[in-house]
Image (cartoon, rainbow, N blue to C red):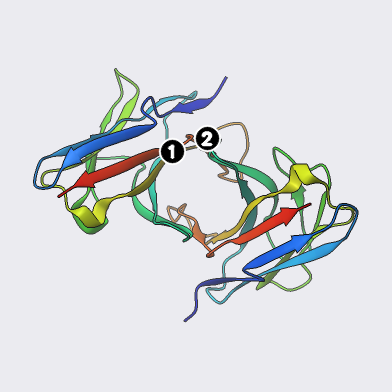
Amino acid sequence: NAGVTQTPKFRVLKTGQSMTLLCAQDMNHEYMYWYRQDPGMGLRLIHYSVGEGTTAKGEVPDGYNVSRLKKQNFLLGLESAAPSQTSVYFCASRSGLADLYEQYFGPGTRLTVT
Amino acid sequence: AQSVAQPEDQVNVAEGNPLTVKCTYSVSGNPYLFWYVQYPNRGLQFLLKYITGDNLVKGSYGFEAEFNKSQTSFHLKKPSALVSDSALYFCAVRDMRNSNYQLIWGAGTKLIIKP
């Protein structure tokens, strides 16, 4: 049981390049989330999904796209990277069962855009 | 507006002393409250939650938190700090504006336990 995994762990992009971050969970969770973490700002929600085939915008969605074609996977795409997207990106998932609201996090992807 | 505040950027405690990491919140209705811990270069780990019931909630690694409705607080506590407790701690509250149980996060408090 690996929990939530993220690939890659590190990436350096040039401005304008594109990339996809992959999140996978093996807990059969309904909900999945993408956050970015910047110093002194806590976590900010980028996009989330309430189930396979569904996605929705979070607090800071601009410049990002997501897809959830399979229940266990949640992909975050950057079509044209900008230096402002330099951050640590975390994926999380949680069960859809009542009273199980806690989220489980992956180890993160550290992205630098130059 | 709904929000979570962690008023201290950093808390320094000597090993063996009790520790408190503060969290206050502002939401409508009954809050769902959470504490997470983040060790260096790691993802966040769930520590404990308050949904309903007893105001004192016990969690992982000997941590507990006390829900205080009148003071809108949910402070994290531990009776005797360990050096290994040094980490970044986040408080979060359920966003009551939607039905998807998204969380509103505090900015985090760095806890440093000195030997």
Q: Amino acid at mark 1?
A: Gly
Q: Give the percent coordinates (x, y) of residue A80.
A: 89, 53
- Horizontal side, residue A4 vs residue B25: left or right: right
Q: Residue furthest front?
A: A114
Q: Give the percent coordinates (x, y) of residue A4.
A: 54, 70
- Horizontal side, residue B79 vs residue A74: left or right: left
Residue B57 is marked as: none
- Horizontal side, residue B96 vs residue B25: left or right: right
Q: Residue at x 40, y 29 (%)?
A: B6
- SS under mark 2: loop
Residue B108 is marked as: 1
Q: Give the percent coordinates (x, y) of residue A48.
A: 69, 52
Is residue B95 at least partly visible in the picture?
yes
Q: CB under 8 Å between callouts 1 and 2?
A: yes
Q: Residues within 10 Å of mark 2 (few under 14, many from 20)?
A: few
Host chain of mark 1: B
Host chain of mark 2: A
- SS under mark 1: loop
Screen quadrant of the N terminus of chain B: top right
In terms of image quadrants, where is residue B91? top left
Q: Look at discs 1 and 2 and give the one toward the viewer.
A: 2
Would you place residue A107 above or below residue B49 in this image?
below
Residue A40 is marked as: 2
Q: Amino acid at mark 2?
A: Gly
In terms of image quadrants, where is residue B90? top left
